[in-house]
Structure formats: structure tokens, C-alpha cells
Amino acid sequence: MKCKFCEWQKNFKKIYENRHCVAVWGSPYVRGHVKVILKRHAENLTELSVEEADSLMDAWIKVGKAIESVLHPDIMNWQINCNWTRHIHGHIYPRWRTDPDWGEPIHLPTRVQADNKEYHPKPLSHEDMLKIEDLLFHKN
């Protein structure tokens, strides 16, 4: 079985990279959503070395700071997953008080809901995307 996160270069646009992790743009349904992916395939946090865990946290913090400095969200939601895609990865979700699900977990659309246009993308402007990428590529 191919892992889309092991083949991240084919599937995602990199916005930050360190020795063990890569950060990529995430879902268009949450403005500014980023995924932080462990480069090596691992399915459980207990498999990580201390160095890999440090790299994961380093990526989260650096990318989170860049998002905060450009988008100024009211709060950031942080999530570590490895259930649907059996590969350690984390999500950074900027949140605003005006979000329809403020105070609740992020609700992303199912494929059916997205196909039926029940959810509407909240795209990041090209200008904000470039500002965040510039901070990450030139200030690390």
C-alpha cells in the first residue's frame, strides 16, 4: 500500500522543512490549514526518537508563528493524527471567533459533502500564502 505522506513530494506543496519533518498546505476548507508530516513512515508517536519528536514540535512552532504573524487568528488548534492515514502527521488550524463551529472541533466536509458543494472552501489569499511561505523560507 502506498502512503500519500511518504510520497509527500507528489501530493503536497512544501512550505517548510527540517531534518525529520515537512510542512505542507492542507485543506482548502480551513483558511491557513497546514499539515506537518514526519518524513519517515511511522504510525505511532511511541516510535519516534527524541530527535524526531523535537523536529515535529520545531516545525509546528515555526509554522504556527508564521501563520499567526500573517493571519492573526483568535486561536490556533493543534492536532496529531495517524488514524485515517497511518503515518504520523499533525495539523495546524487557525481559528476565528466568526467560524461557524467556533468552540468546537474542526468539522471538515466528507467527500460527498464537498462534491455536493455543501461546504465552501475558505481559501487563503495568494498574497497571504506568499507572506507565510516567505517567512518560513527566508527566516529560519
Image (tube, grey):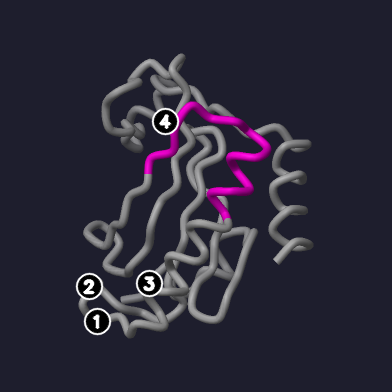
Q: Residue at x 76, y 44 (%)?
A: 131
Residue at mark 1 to residue at mark 2: CA–CA distance: 6 Å
Would residue 80 be found to the left or right of residue 73 on screen?
left
Residue at mark 4 to residue at mark 3: CA–CA distance: 24 Å
Q: Which residue is drawn at 40% across and 79% down?
A: 52
What label does residue 61 carry, if any? Answer: none
Assess whether residue 83 is covered by the magenta stretch. no
Residue under numbered circle 4: 115
Which quadrant, please, contains the N terminus?
bottom left
The residue carrying mark 3 is: 3
Left or right of residue 69: residue 84: left
> In which quarter of the view is residue 122 placed?
top right
Image point (45%, 47%), residue name: 92
Q: Secondary structure under badge 4?
A: helix
**Residue at numbered disc 1:** 47
Question: Of tags 3 and 2, which is closer to the observer?
Answer: 2
- Rate crowding at label 4 as few (under 14), some (14 to 19) or many (20 or more) other CA atoms within 10 Å: few
Q: Give the range drawn in magenta.
A: 63-77
Q: Which of marks 1 and 4 is nearer the N terminus?
A: 1
